[in-house]
Image (tube, grey):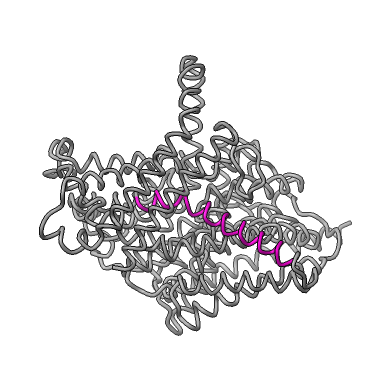
């Protein structure tokens, strides 16, 4: 009950803060510019998954309608602050009503019934959630929420054919199930968001203001001096870390890509490859423990398991993905000659400037892995450790004085504000996802789709996995990964579990493909943003992103057939990890067409591809034989090139 009550307060404050932020942005720049993700001002950065698509549609509409541009849009722009202020007041009023009547709504109303006022307040809360989602994440995901509501109505449901048909829900039932019955909007998604997710976003916001992002950029620029690959691998690492925190492939591409893509282009890397590398790295960050782009929190709550268990399951798949990305990037650099000579030694003082960030990260790891605290507790202690560490660090470096304390306090307050601003847009979408989940559950759509998937697969396990993968990508196109994951997992995962796949495996499988939709055409939202920053062709960049990220589409199938990668056991996990890692390396050689020494022919690529498939999915003995074959083939190719070079020298 206490968590539900807190969720309501979080909803009210979050919506109020979100609409006030909208007012501030509208007044500051008349809808043309907003503060950038780093808080430094400038042109609006398209940081949400649906912003690019919405922006393209809006530009087309503006260009085709002079009446809209000259007459209607200015009126809407001027009226927007007033509308947002009214919506902020309504949000506070609606959630205050729920708080005032909370005990009755929780205990008495399900028995005695809901009043007309209750039901109207429920409708208002639903509409506020949809509106906030539209404003924060664009038209696509708002359309999904609105579509789920229309689908649930008696106007639409009974008219639909086959598996999609149902008897329909009246507006009173939609209000009850969607909000005022303390379900839907107030479901587990908002509950998790208001506790586990919010604390980590606050932590990230404070760390950002304290200079974490600047430290990562400075360390990246310094590290490239002593690496043959230059800035590229450092860019991948930076995108990994930031992607795990942001939970948005598009936001991560926009923020880190604005630094890394120009740096890669300056190194001589072709612009389509620069866009592709950043897009793939930013997308994969969402699978990186411990945060996993907030999906880890949602997954733990949905499965009813500990957060640490989800992190454990995500470690090896994330390692496999980034192992493949690192190899692919390295092979591409060697293939096209984009490596750089060492330009100097690494300046260790750069690391010392950010060493204090290790303290809160150590606290986070200890509280999660050793003390086994909840994410809320671990995040709280880590935030306190971060703030305390920065105070101590500033006192040591700048001296113990009231002015230093005042400046650090001012910086801390700004950090809390940044965290609150970062949390605010998430409130509406979390509430909206609860609505979608409630509507598709109440209409029985989830059970029907699961049964249909099993039927379409015809009892063949591989077909079921392929259908699940395609469905996950399709539902994930143009959506933030947490939203895509929730939508896909309620529709697809039950069919996989019914087929005998273990729960964590099924959830990880659909999560990976929902995430990879960010680099999958025709939408490929991360690539769209990356190619825009790089001034490269979207289609060409998408092609390169698929080549670099190709192993990511195979890894989920690998951990379904080798589920000891997720459910750790000795020695099975070690054996499976070794086999799959080598197989992934072989697959990367096949997709890049380069083995580290020379460009290989199509038959050779086919051989590497076949060996990688057997190494991941064959019986254990055959897997081992395939892996030995891969190692021998790579060694032979390397030795042959060395002999050829030696012969060339002797001949000269």
Q: Magenta span has 287?
A: no
Q: Residue furthest top?
A: 66
**Whether residue 452 can be seen here:** no
Rendered residue at 50%/70% (across/down): 315
Pick the quarter of the image with the N terminus: bottom left
Q: Residue furthest right?
A: 652
The answer to whether residue 53 is above or below residue 464 is above
Rendered residue at 20%/60% (across/down): 104
Classify residue 122 as left or right of residue 290.
left
Classify residue 342 as left or right of residue 444.
right
Please give the range of residues in magenta.
404-431
**Whether residue 505 can be seen here:** yes
The answer to whether residue 133 is above or below residue 303 is above
Q: Total of numbered circles in the picture?
A: 0
Residue 310 lies in quadrant: bottom left
Residue 630 lies in quadrant: bottom right
Classify residue 164 as left or right of residue 301.
left
Taking depth in this image into account, of 150 and 82 the one nearest to the observer is 82
Q: Magenta span has 408?
A: yes
The answer to whether residue 498 is above or below residue 478 is below
């Amino acid at each position: 009950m206490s968590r539900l009550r807190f969720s309501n307060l979080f909803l009210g404050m979050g919506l109020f803060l979100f609409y006030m932020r909208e007012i501030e942005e509208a007044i500051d720049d008349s809808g043309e510019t907003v503060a950038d993700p780093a808080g430094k001002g400038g042109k609006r950065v398209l940081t949400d998954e649906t912003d690019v698509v919405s922006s393209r549609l809006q530009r087309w509409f503006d260009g085709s309608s002079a009446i809209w541009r000259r007459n209607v849009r200015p009126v809407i722009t001027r009226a927007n602050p007033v509308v947002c202020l009214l919506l902020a007041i309504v949000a506070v009023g609606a959630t205050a009503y729920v708080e005032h009547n909370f005990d009755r709504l929780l205990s008495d109303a399900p028995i005695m019934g809901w009043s007309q006022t209750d039901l109207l307040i429920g409708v208002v809360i639903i509409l506020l959630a949809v509106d906030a989602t539209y404003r924060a994440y664009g038209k696509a995901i708002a359309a999904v929420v609105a579509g789920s509501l229309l689908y649930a109505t008696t106007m639409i449901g009974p008219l639909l054919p086959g598996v999609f048909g149902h008897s329909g829900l009246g507006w009173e039932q939609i209000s009850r199930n969607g909000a005022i019955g303390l379900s839907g909007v107030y479901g587990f998604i908002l509950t998790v968001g208001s506790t586990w997710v919010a604390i980590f976003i606050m932590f990230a916001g404070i760390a950002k203001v304290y200079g974490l992002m600047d430290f990562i950029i400075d360390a990246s620029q310094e590290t490239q001096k002593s690496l043959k690959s230059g800035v590229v691998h450092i860019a991948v690492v930076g995108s990994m870390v930031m992607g795990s925190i942001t939970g948005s492939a598009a936001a991560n591409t926009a923020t880190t890509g604005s630094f890394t893509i120009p740096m890669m282009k300056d190194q001589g890397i072709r612009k389509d490859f620069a866009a592709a590398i950043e897009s793939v790295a930013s997308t994969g960050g969402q699978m990186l423990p411990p945060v996993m782009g907030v999906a880890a929190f949602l997954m733990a709550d949905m499965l009813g398991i500990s957060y640490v268990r989800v992190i454990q399951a995500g470690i090896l798949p994330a390692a496999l993905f980034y192992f493949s990305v690192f190899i692919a990037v390295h092979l591409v650099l060697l293939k096209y000659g984009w490596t750089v000579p060492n330009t100097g030694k690494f300046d260790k003082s750069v690391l010392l400037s950010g060493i204090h960030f290790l303290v809160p990260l150590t606290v986070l790891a200890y509280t999660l892995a050793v003390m086994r605290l909840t994410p809320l507790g671990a995040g709280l202690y880590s935030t306190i450790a971060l703030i305390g560490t920065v105070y101590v660090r500033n006192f040591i470096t700048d001296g113990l004085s009231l002015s230093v304390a005042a400046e650090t306090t001012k910086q801390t307050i700004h950090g809390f504000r940044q965290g609150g601003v970062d949390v605010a847009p998430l409130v509406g979408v979390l509430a909206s996802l609860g609505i979608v989940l409630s509507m598709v559950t109440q209409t029985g759509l989830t059970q029907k789709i699961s049964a249909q998937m099993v039927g379409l697969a015809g009892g063949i396990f591989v077909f079921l996995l392929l259908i699940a993968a395609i469905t996950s990508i399709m539902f994930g196109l143009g959506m933030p990964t947490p939203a895509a994951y929730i939508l896909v997992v309620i529709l697809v995962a039950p069919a996989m579990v019914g087929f005998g796949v273990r729960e964590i495996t099924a959830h990880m499988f659909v999560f990976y493909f929902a995430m990879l939709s960010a680099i999958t055409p025709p939408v490929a939202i991360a690539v769209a943003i990356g190619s825009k920053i790089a001034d490269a062709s979207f289609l060409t960049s998408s092609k390169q992103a698929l080549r670099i990220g190709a192993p990511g589409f195979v890894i989920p199938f690998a951990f379904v057939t080798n589920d000891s990668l997720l459910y750790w056991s000795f020695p099975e996990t070690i054996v499976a990890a070794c086999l799959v890692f080598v197989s992934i390396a072989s697959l990367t050689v096949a997709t890049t067409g380069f083995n580290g020494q020379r460009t290989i022919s199509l038959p050779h690529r086919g051989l590497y591809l076949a060996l990688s498939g057997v190494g991941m999915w064959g019986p254990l003995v055959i897997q081992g034989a395939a892996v030995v074959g891969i190692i021998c083939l790579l060694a032979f190719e390397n030795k042959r090139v060395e002999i050829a070079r030696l012969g060339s020298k002797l001949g000269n």
